[in-house]
Image (spheres, grey):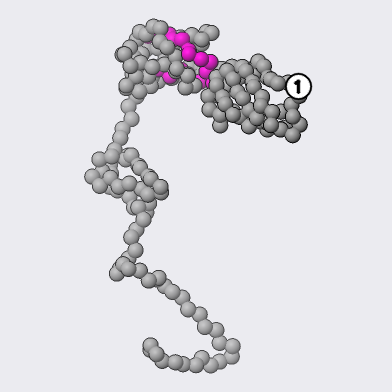
Amino acid sequence: MSGTKSTIKGNKPIFAQDTIRHYSINKFYEPIPLEFLSAAATSPQVLVMVDGIEAICPNLNCDYTYSAPNAKITSQKLTGNVIEVEGTDLPVTADVEVSISGTACSINEKTATKVTCTLSSTPTAGDWHVEVRDSEGRANPGSVAKISIPLIVKTVSPKADINFYGGTVLTLTGTGFPLETKKAKVKLDDQTNCKVLTATANEITCKL
């Protein structure tokens, strides 16, 4: 009982205590985290999370469905800076956009079976599908072969008098360079890293 003192006697007695449940302001149970719960939704729901907190959709009306587009690409090719795409039910609306690897392509011709356009700059190197899209979304790329964009370095300057202890800024020109500095990496043959400062489709500058 509270306030009662007793002495434990025996041969090397051991005393242990377990706290079954910590103190809480809730009278019965702690709240159940949302990740332990599931809603009685009959279709998949759009999930939103901000700073680790999951949003609630009380009316279960955050559902979505997929649909296959009618537009389908059957062939694609790049000749110089001109892209030619052939397909079926290709979009011909005013909001049609064409791009490859994120590089915009100015439309020259558009019909339900053929679209041609001219690139504004050299696309980023890699293997890519041409994206043809309008307000309804992207055309189905199908199983056509991707277009390969090579990565080419044409010049590096300076080539001589590079400071052994660093600080020299190098300028590289070429084609297929990424447009984001974080996607480009430059280093010398002796494994010295060169921190990328700027990057365009045709030029990269970095500092040793």
Q: Is residue 51 above or below residue 105?
A: below
Is residue 8 toward the left or the right of residue 152 in the image? left
Q: Who's the residue at 59% across and 29% down the image?
A: 197
Which one is nearer the viewer's eye here, 2 or 194?
194
Q: Secondary structure at mark 1?
A: loop
Q: Is residue 198 left or right of residue 48?
A: right
Residue 202 x %, y %: 57, 18
Q: Is residue 125 visible?
A: no
> Which residue is at 31% across, 13% downward?
94
Residue 195 image offset from top left, x and y in percent: 63, 32
Q: Tell me residue 97's x, y (percent).
A: 38, 17
Q: Nearer the viewer, residue 38 or 125?
A: 125
- Amino acid under disc 1: Ala
Residue 12 image position (x, y, % from top left):
59, 88
Residue 23 position (above or below residue 49): below
Which quadrant: the N terminus?
Answer: bottom left
Q: Which residues are magenta?
A: 113-132
Q: Quadrant of residue 109?
A: top left
Q: State whether residue 204 appears in this view.
A: yes
Residue 81 among magenta residues? no
Q: Residues within 10 Å of mark 1 (few under 14, many from 20)?
A: few
Give the residue drawn at x 48%, y 12%. Answer: 119
Q: Is residue 190 left or right of residue 124?
A: right
Residue at the disc numbered 1:
160
- Residue at the limit of the structure toward the top, as seen here: 109
- On the rendered image, what quadrant is the C terminus found in? top right
| 47 to the left or right of 74 | left
Along the line of sight, the residue nearer the viewer: 92 or 183: 183
Residues 156 and 129: in front is 156
Q: Residue at x 34, y 14 (%)?
A: 91
